[in-house]
């Protein structure tokens, strides 16, 4: 008689579903996050004091690893709360995005408490996201962003859509590099990688392009153990081949690349600029930095920074349309956006969301040099931190949920790898 799967296996399977329809179904990732939180709460409520004591001992033994996830994921909601109280203006909607990071920590502790690792499941569900997206996107509802000439779905800006597609394509590239012989998994990861790259290309989004050579460098350095100079040369050659090949054969990439360099050359640092894509982003950063200096500790969230839009520091380089348009369209930069909203603490919590988990995966790769989840986590962080320079990729409920779930899933899988290593050492 076939034994039924344990409740832990079912729970892990449900949690691992979070990426699959993330780019297709509005609210999918958030729904899985909330369901995962419920599963975690029920688990801890039902478990004995002995189990909870074991978890506390595990956290104490690997304190630094846990702090590198817990502190960055706790900071956003704390800083938003302090900033709101300091301004005397509390809006519950301001906690939507930041709360996702805090909630995901419950799921993280659940995943490291159980015997079942998430690694095997996410090695399928993460690559399935770009594959399912490319197969189903034509059948999704056509409105809002989906009506754009640039590929996306109705609830995701093409910039975010392209950035996430690129990130998941690069993660599939990492998984593919760990296939030591040709198999159906190799084909699966290759299809996922190419699907992610195509979706990013079709979105015509330059957001995250500069992450590609850095991701290649990380992959070559950690996977093939070359020294820095050799890794740099190999990465440079591959990146140049990719850049020259895509520029020569793709009209979209040629047009977008030429436009980028033309915008940079045309930008005037001490004169009012025309409204170009890159020029606007440079002006947004300069405007945002100035606004942040006016309220460096609490920021402007729920206040009107446009009262300073005609200050000389702004008018000398930004057109009237840019000065007003930033209120509705944002600063197109995660770091600057949060610096304006919450001051220097907002900038710091944004940096910590990348630096903390980044250090977690770097330290893990020192202990487990062949860890594919460690490498995937590092590639995700690099892609999203660079994408954050040109858009708000963690500022929305959907993106906050997806980033939080990806980090805690990969980090929990890494902690299970570490536990297995301890057991193996103990056997010898």
Image (tube, rainbow, N blue to C red):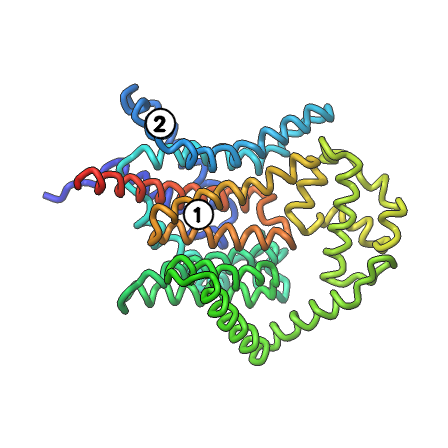
User: Which residue has dot 2 on it?
Assistant: 42
Q: Residues within 10 Å of mark 2 (few under 14, many from 20)?
A: few
What residue is rendered at 53% in x and 32% in y? 74
Cα–Cα gap, marks 1 and 2 = 33 Å
Q: Exactly how many numbered labels are in the figure?
A: 2
The residue most toward the left is 1
Residue 362 — which label? Answer: 1
What residue is rendered at 29% in x and 40% in y? 10
Residue 221 percent location from the top left of the image: 43, 60
> 11 or 227: nearer the eye?
227
Q: Is residue 9 visible?
A: no
What residue is rendered at 46% in x and 36% in y? 104
Q: Is residue 272 above or below residue 247?
A: above
What residue is rendered at 57% in x and 38% in y? 97
Residue 395 percent location from the top left of the image: 61, 44
> Secondary structure beneath disc 2?
helix
> 166 or 20: nearer the eye?
166
Q: Is residue 150 left or right of residue 3?
A: right
Q: Is residue 128 left or right of residue 233?
A: left
């Amino acid at each position: 008689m076939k034994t039924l799967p344990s409740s832990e296996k079912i729970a892990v399977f449900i949690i691992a579903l979070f990426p699959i329809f993330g780019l297709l179904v509005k609210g999918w990732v958030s729904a899985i996050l909330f369901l995962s939180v419920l599963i975690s709460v029920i688990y801890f409520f039902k478990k004995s004091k002995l189990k909870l004591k074991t978890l506390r001992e595990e956290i104490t033994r690997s304190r630094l690893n846990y702090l590198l996830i817990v502190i960055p994921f706790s900071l956003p909601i704390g800083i938003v709360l302090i900033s709101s109280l300091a301004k005397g203006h509390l809006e519950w909607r301001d906690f939507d995005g930041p709360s996702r990071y805090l909630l995901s920590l419950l799921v993280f502790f659940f995943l490291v408490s159980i015997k079942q690792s998430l690694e095997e499941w996410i090695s399928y569900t993460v690559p399935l996201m770009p594959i399912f997206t490319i197969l189903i996107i034509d059948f999704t509802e056509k409105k809002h962003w989906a009506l754009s000439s640039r590929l996306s779905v109705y609830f995701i800006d093409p910039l975010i859509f392209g950035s996430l597609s690129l990130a998941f394509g690069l993660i599939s590239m990492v998984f593919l590099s760990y296939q030591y012989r040709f198999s159906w998994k190799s084909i699966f990861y290759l299809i996922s990688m190419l699907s992610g790259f195509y979706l990013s290309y079709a979105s015509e989004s330059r957001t995250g392009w500069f992450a590609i050579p850095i991701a290649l460098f990380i992959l070559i350095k950690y996977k093939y153990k070359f020294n820095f100079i050799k890794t740099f040369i190999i990465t440079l050659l591959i990146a140049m081949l990719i850049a020259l090949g895509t520029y020569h054969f793709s009209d979209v990439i040629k047009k977008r690349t030429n436009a980028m360099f033309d915008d940079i050359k045309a930008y005037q640092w001490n004169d009012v600029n025309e409204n170009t894509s890159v020029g606007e982003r440079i002006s947004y950063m300069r405007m945002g930095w100035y606004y942040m200096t006016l309220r460096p500790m609490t920021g402007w969230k729920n206040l009107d920074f446009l009262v300073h839009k005609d200050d000389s520091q702004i008018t000398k380089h930004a057109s009237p349309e840019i000065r007003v348009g930033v209120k509705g369209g944002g600063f197109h930069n995660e770091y600057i956006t949060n610096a304006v909203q919450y001051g220097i603490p907002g900038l710091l919590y944004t940096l910590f969301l990348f630096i903390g988990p980044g250090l977690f995966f770097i330290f893990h790769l020192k202990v487990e040099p062949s860890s594919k989840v460690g490498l995937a986590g590092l590639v995700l962080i690099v892609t999203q931190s660079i994408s954050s320079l040109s858009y708000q990729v963690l500022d929305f409920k959907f993106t906050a949920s997806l980033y939080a779930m990806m980090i805690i899933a990969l980090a929990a899988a890494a902690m299970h790898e570490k536990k297995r290593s301890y057991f193996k050492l103990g056997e010898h």
